[in-house]
């Protein structure tokens, strides 16, 4: 009789898997056996703290003698003395009357005279432009009619500017130049006042005002035979020469 072998029944097909599982189990048991630790069990002493009964200690009582407060002072007694004085002066009573006016009151008519009041005339400072004034301010040394005085005034003004002109040294070092317009007033007494200037720099404005303040006293301008103030303006050019 022949034995029939089942081809599908292969017993050794999973042998490698079983071998690996068994090897891992043996390694795990070996590791646990090596790492296992044991401790000696000895007797543990337990200390018991015994507290005896606390004896009551008698604390002496201290008595503090506090003096009693002083007795209150007796109340002060005031004796009222009434002195009778003879009434020797008669006191006149003041009667206050009402100052209100009713419809029945009659108002007395009276005339009020106004005394003569002295009216003081205040002379106003009048300013007339140089171009339309009847008589221009007279520069010292100028004579003639109004047109001649105008021409002489402008000539004397140019001579005064050239004579007193001085270029500021700081403006030279900084190369500052330009035109400065100076405005001033020849008042009713002939003095030069209210000098103002407008220019490219404060150094040039200061120098221009200095030159105008050196102008002499003049005969004031007149309008309708009355001294008046005359405003005037003059340009001053500050220019450096090329070296």
Image (cartoon, rainbow, N blue to C red):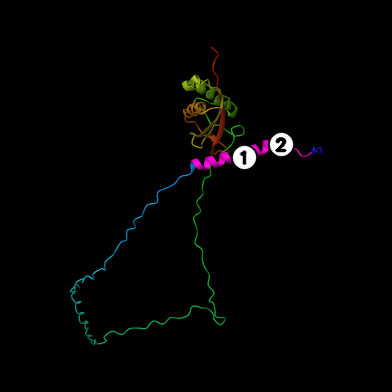
Which residue is painted at 47% across and 22% down in the image? 170
Q: Position of residue 10 (x, y in %)?
A: 75, 37
- Tell me the residue at 62%/40% (across/down): 22
Please give left or right for residue 155 compared with residue 62 in the image. Answer: right
Q: Give the farthest residue toward the front.
A: 1
- Spatial separation of the CA atoms under disc 2 and disc 1: 15 Å
156 lies above or below 11:
above
- In this picture, is 146 found above or below 43? above
Vertical placement of 62 versus 200: above or below? below
SS category of the residue bearing label 2: helix
- Going from the N terminus, do you reach mark 2 or mark 1 first? 2
The extreme top residue here reads: 243
Quadrant location, the N terminus:
top right
Q: Residues within 10 Å of mark 1 (few under 14, many from 20)?
A: few
Q: Residues within 10 Å of mark 2 (few under 14, many from 20)?
A: few
Q: Nearer the observer, disc 2 or disc 1?
A: 2
Q: Secondary structure at mark 1?
A: helix
For disc 1, the marked residue is 22
Q: Quadrant of residue 104?
A: bottom right
**Is residue 37 on the magenta stretch?**
no
Principal SS element in the magenta part?
helix
Tell me residue 217's x, y (percent). Answer: 47, 31
| Horizontal relation, residue 15 to residue 180: left or right | right
Kindly identify which residue carries mark 2.
Answer: 12
* Residue occupying the point 50% across, 19% down: 172
In magenta segment, residue 25: yes
Looking at the rendering, the stretch of residues picked out in magenta corresponds to: 8-34
Front residue of 82/11: it is 11
Q: Nearer the viewer, residue 233 or 117?
A: 233
């Amino acid at each position: 009789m022949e034995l029939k072998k089942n081809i599908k029944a292969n017993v050794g097909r999973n042998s490698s898997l079983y071998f690996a599982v068994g090897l891992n189990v043996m390694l795990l048991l070996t590791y646990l056996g090596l790492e296992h630790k044991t401790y000696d069990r000895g007797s543990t002493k337990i200390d018991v703290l015994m507290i005896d009964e606390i004896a009551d200690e008698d604390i002496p009582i201290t008595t503090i003698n506090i003096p009693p407060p002083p007795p209150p002072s007796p109340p002060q007694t005031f004796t009222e003395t009434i002195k009778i004085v003879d009434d020797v002066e008669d006191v006149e009573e003041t009667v206050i009357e009402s100052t209100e006016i009713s419809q029945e009151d009659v108002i007395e008519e009276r005339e009020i005279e106004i005394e003569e009041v002295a009216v003081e005339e205040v002379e106003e400072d009048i300013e007339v432009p140089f171009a339309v004034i009847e008589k221009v301010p007279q520069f010292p040394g100028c004579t003639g009619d109004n047109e001649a005085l105008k021409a002489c005034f402008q000539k004397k003004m140019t001579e005064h500017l050239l004579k007193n002109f001085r270029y500021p040294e700081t403006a030279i070092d900084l190369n500052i130049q330009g035109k400065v317009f100076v405005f001033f007033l020849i008042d009713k007494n002939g003095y030069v006042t209210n000098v103002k200037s407008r220019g490219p720099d404060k150094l040039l404005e200061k120098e221009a005002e200095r030159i105008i303040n050196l102008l002499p006293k003049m005969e004031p301008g007149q309008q309708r035979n009355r001294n008046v103030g005359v405003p005037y303006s003059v340009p001053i050019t500050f220019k450096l020469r090329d070296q």
